[in-house]
Amino acid sequence: MNNIPVQDYYPDELSYCNGCGRNNEYGHHIKSYWDGNETVAHFTPKDYHIAIPGYVYGGLIASIIDCHGTGSAALAAYHAENREPDSLPAFRFVTASLQIDYLKPTPLGVELELRGKIIEVKGRKVISEITVSANGEVTARGKVVAVQMPENMV
Amino acid sequence: MNNIPVQDYYPDELSYCNGCGRNNEYGHHIKSYWDGNETVAHFTPKDYHIAIPGYVYGGLIASIIDCHGTGSAALAAYHAENREPDSLPAFRFVTASLQIDYLKPTPLGVELELRGKIIEVKGRKVISEITVSANGEVTARGKVVAVQMPENMV
């Protein structure tokens, strides 16, 4: 596992994302790494990320799947070009679509593990499948279609 | 348009949701109403709900679609039983699955309108389609499968 997350290589002006931007004071700061052929991130929800007592809010689960999905897409894009995330140009993906299945309630108060599998890298698009686990059990599963950010977007 | 949102009728102990709970100090406080045959809610993202400069974070969009979807499900369930949200027992739905298509970037700095159409009410399940609009243009579309919360969940 490389010990620098891909988000640390996002250009400074593109690092304000509420989910994964290192420059967002109020954000979740999701950090995505390779772990073998999978990608991994960890996140411990705050008390106020509650849905109903004892369980994590579905919108927060969607948010961390989203950001680990775009982070995984960037990792996969560097890999497809056989170069490291510290090389240029930097990859920055945005989400085209998100599908989340909430398989069971996600308990609040424990660290969650996100694991990503890259399903497809094609042109400017990367599709990944992301699971969220709590206490070793998968509680939610997502599919993220990410596309490389258009140059004219900023 | 009824001037009391369905979330105001959720039982007090089930009103801490980060997306729509009136008792969550740090939440989004989504409020869902009937407007004719559709449901409606409004939300103005904060500056820190940013994705990349100028645009709203996809996780926030997923979150508000999620909560307007479960709110719309509750409204539809009361309607199916031909009673008002101030009658008992109260309905409280949770999300089984969420599909979001990000059609175009959502501009930051304006009020967003969420509109919901009820697609199906069947047993304990309600399916809705939710759009998010900014400046009158639909920027994201979601499908929310909501199920009535199991009694043993709290």
Image (cartoon, coloured by chain):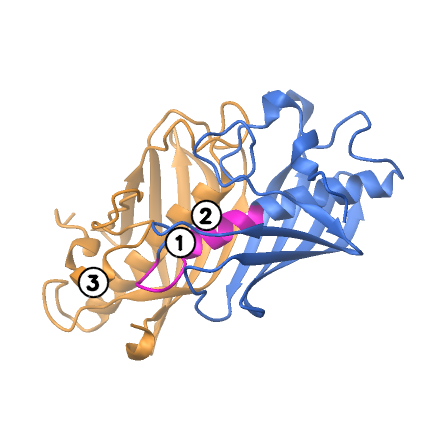
Chain colours: A blue, B orange
The residues tagged by marks 3 and 2 sit, at their Cα atoms, a distance apart of 24 Å
Q: Is residue A36 above or below residue A8?
A: below
Q: Is residue A141 above or below residue A70?
A: below
Residue B123, quarter of the rendered image: bottom left
Q: Earlier in the sequence, mark 3 or mark 2?
A: 3
In the displayed structure, does residue A78 sit left or right of residue A92?
A: right
- Residue type at mark 3: give it: Glu
Tell me the subunit letter for badge 2: B
Q: Earlier in the sequence, mark 3 or mark 1?
A: 3
Q: Examine the rendering and report whether any part of residue B16 can be seen.
A: yes
Q: x and y percent of residue A81 in the render?
A: 87, 38
Tell me the subunit letter for badge 3: B
User: What kind of element bears circle 2?
Assistant: helix
What segment is highlighted magenta in the picture? A51-66
Tell me the subunit letter for badge 1: B
User: What kind of element bears circle 3?
Assistant: helix
Q: Assess whether mark 2 and mark 1 are in contact (beta carbons under 8 angstroms).
A: yes
Task: Kindly identify which residue carries mark 3.
Answer: B13
**Residue drawn 23% across and 71% down?**
B80
**Residue drawn 70% across and 46% down?**
A33
Q: x and y percent of residue B52 in the render?
A: 55, 28
The residues tagged by marks 1 and 2 sit, at their Cα atoms, a distance apart of 6 Å
The disc label shown at residue B62, or none: 2
The disc label shown at residue B121, or none: none
- Residue type at mark 2: give it: Ala
Q: Assess whether mark 1 and mark 3 are in contact (beta carbons under 8 angstroms).
A: no
